[in-house]
Each structure stands twice: as C-alpha cells, then as structure tokens.
Amino acid sequence: MPTYAYETVDVFTDRRFGGNPLAVFTDARGMSDAEMQALAAEMNYSETTFVLPPENPAHTARVRIFNPTAELPFAGHPNVGTAWVLARHGRDKNGVLLFEELAGLVEVKVERDAAGEATTATITAPQPLSTGIELPAEGIAACAGLSPGDIVTATHNPLQASVGVMFVVAEVKGEALSRALPDITAHRALEAAHPVKRLVLSLYARDSEKIRARLFAPLAGIWEDPATGAASATLAALLLSLEGGDSAHFELTQGVEMGRPSLLKLTAQRGPDGIRATVGGGCVPVFRGEALL
C-alpha cells in the first residue's frame, strides 16, 4: 500500500491555530487526479497542495492545488505555505522558488532569520490584473445576508477581478463586514442570473492602507476562508488600478470572525504588461503524517 508524506502549516500567521491551515503533500508522484481530489476532500481544508517534479528543470516544482471539490489554477495561501515547507527542506535557491501551476509560473521569495530558519514567504501573482462583469449590489448583499445599503459603491461597483483566479470583489461598510453571513440560496440565484461560475465572494472594508476582509465560497464547499492570498492580491491590484499611482502597499486582516486571525502584506505595482501584485506572510508548522492509498 503506497504511503504519501504530508505536512500541515498555518499560513499568514505567527502563531499556531491562527491563519489559514494548509496540507502539503511534499512528493505526490504516483497519485492520480482522483486520489488528489479525494485527499483534499478528506483533509477538508480550504486548499491542499500536491508537489510534483517540474516540467522545466530550472523550476522548483509543479504544484497542483485542490479545494474540497475542484482543482484551482492558482491560490495565495497554498503557494505561501508550500514554499515555506519546501524551503525548510532546502528546496529554495537563494531564497527563491518557482512553481509551475495551471495559471502560470509563480515566483515565491522566502525570508530567513539569523539562524537560517524560514520565517515568511511572498508570492508574485502569475497574471496581471484583469476584470470581468459588474454585479448588482442587491444580489451581492443577499449573498452575504446584508442589505443593499451596506454595499459601498463610491470607489467601484461589485465586480469580477483576477490576478490568476477570479473573485467577485465588493466593498462594504465596516460594521456590516462583521455581521455578514453567507446565504447559499442567494449564491445559487446570483450564479443563475449572471455569467459567474463558482461564485467566490470577497468582501472588504477599508481605512486607508488598512483593510479588513472576509471571503465566502459555499458553492465550492468553503463556508468562510480565514485568509485568502489570491483574493487579497487581486484587491491590492484593483485598488491601485482605480486610484492611480505607480505602486501601493496594504496590510489586510482576515479570519477574525472565525477565531483564526490572519495578517497579509500586499503590494501592487504598474508594469509594462499591467498591474502586478504580491502577497506575503508568516507560517507555523502544525502536523506531520502519512496518507495510505
């Protein structure tokens, strides 16, 4: 019976049982797609990663990312956590790892302390900012159990945006963010009424460079996510696109309402191919084990 080693880490935190948990299968050679999906469902984390040899030997690894119901082209906290785990195994080159993923090549930079231990990891999203359709404030409010007046549209209407994977991004009033609660029936209704596949709703409230966020994806089996790096990077890029300037820096907190506070450091910068974003944070090891297949 084949066995596959895995490690779990809490991502975007400096303390155990904060942040967003992640399972990393450090050598997934021999696993089928169905087995990867089954293991991700069994782990029941928002994402689980599977590390494979790269197609290009100049890269670190090919990394596949699964949530409990489907494979993802890219995600933030899985890249940060996977890079941190592999760096502890000595897989980085001068603090850099390159991951081949469905959305493209992802670069991750790892910081180490004076003793040489990995402390934080920062990823560059694989794609520049792109945006999709706008969605009605009334429908977004219903998805989050809020009233239409709780949705803030002064800067932008609720809309689709991506730096590698698509989210629906909406600004809400600060006090409304804490009382938001996903309504799965409203999510299904909004998907049926608009060309949105697997609606993932990213809500935020902002005070200058300080941002609070929550993310709901009940149709993907994730009622709420404690830290979502891809959505956070998307938001940083979106805000820079709307407000102008060459670059921007933000600090984003998420997971507070879940009892898993997370801190994400964000940057966005204009470049020749559009607006690119980074997201980084710390990690803490939790479990090690083996899966039997």
Image: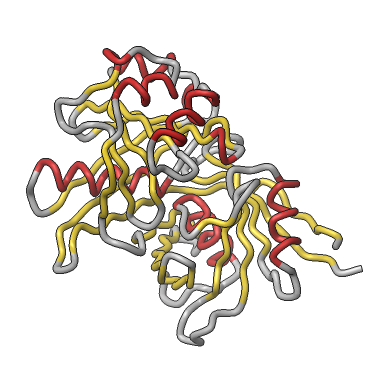
**Residue 285 image offset from top left, x and y in percent:** 62, 49
**Residue 105 visible somewhere in the drawing:** yes
Vertical position of residue 4 compared to residue 158: above or below: below
Which residue sits furthest bottom? 57
Residue 231: which quarter of the image? top left
Task: Point out the image quarter for the C terminus.
Answer: bottom right
Is residue 16 or residue 79 the one in the foreground?
79
**Residue 102 image offset from top left, x and y in percent:** 48, 67
Q: How many numbered marks does the figure carry?
A: 0
Is residue 26 or residue 1 the one in the foreground?
1
**Residue 9 visible somewhere in the drawing:** no
Residue 138 vs residue 120: left or right?
A: left
Q: Name the residue rendered at 28%, 33% in the picture.
A: 158
Which residue sits furthest front? 193
Q: Name the residue rendered at 66%, 50% in the picture.
A: 8
Residue 121 vs residue 259: left or right?
A: left
Q: Name the residue rendered at 52%, 56% in the picture.
A: 72
Residue 9 vs residue 226: left or right?
A: right
**Residue 38 image offset from top left, x and y in percent:** 74, 53
Vertical position of residue 156 compared to residue 291: above or below: above
**Residue 188 image offset from top left, x and y in percent:** 51, 31
Residue 92 vs residue 2: left or right?
A: left
Which residue sits furthest right? 1
Residue 111: which quarter of the image? bottom left
The structure's colour scheme is: secondary structure
Task: Point out the image quarter for the N terminus.
Answer: bottom right
